[in-house]
Image (cartoon, rainbow, N blue to C red):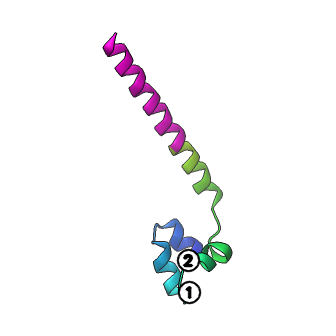
């Protein structure tokens, strides 16, 4: 349940509370497991953001020339 709620974007503090924990430390140490697909999506999103940022900087440099 904790991993699914985490994947759905439920705030960690809310998940921990529903499990009866006072803080999120136990939650992340024992319950929440990263899904491989989420890891791949995060890497792809970061790569996309970096490519866009690079393109934006290049666009500004060309406009200034």
Residue 52 on image: x %, y %: 44, 32
Residue 53 is labelled as none
Main SS class of the magenta portion in the image: helix
Q: Which residues are magenta?
A: 46-65
Q: Residue at x 50, y 86 (%)?
A: 18
Say left or right for 63 vs 11: left
- Density class for disc 1 (Cα within 10 Å; few <14, some 14-19, many ≥20) is some
- The residue that mark 1 highlights is 21
> Which residue lies most toward the bottom here?
20
- Density class for disc 2 (Cα within 10 Å; few <14, some 14-19, many ≥20) is some
Residue 24 is labelled as 2
Q: Residue at x 58, y 56 (%)?
A: 38
In the rendered image, residue 18 lying in the magenta stretch gets the answer no
Which type of secondary structure does the marked residue at label 1 adopt? Answer: loop
In the rendered image, residue 58 lying in the magenta stretch gets the answer yes
Q: For the N terminus, give its image quadrant.
A: bottom right
């Amino acid at each position: 349940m904790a991993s699914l709620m985490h994947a759905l974007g439920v705030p960690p503090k809310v998940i921990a509370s529903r499990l009866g924990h006072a803080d999120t430390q136990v939650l992340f140490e024992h319950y929440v497991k990263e899904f491989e697909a989420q890891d791949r999506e995060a890497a792809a999103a970061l790569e996309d953001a970096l490519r866009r940022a690079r393109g934006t900087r290049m666009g500004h440099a060309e406009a200034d020339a």
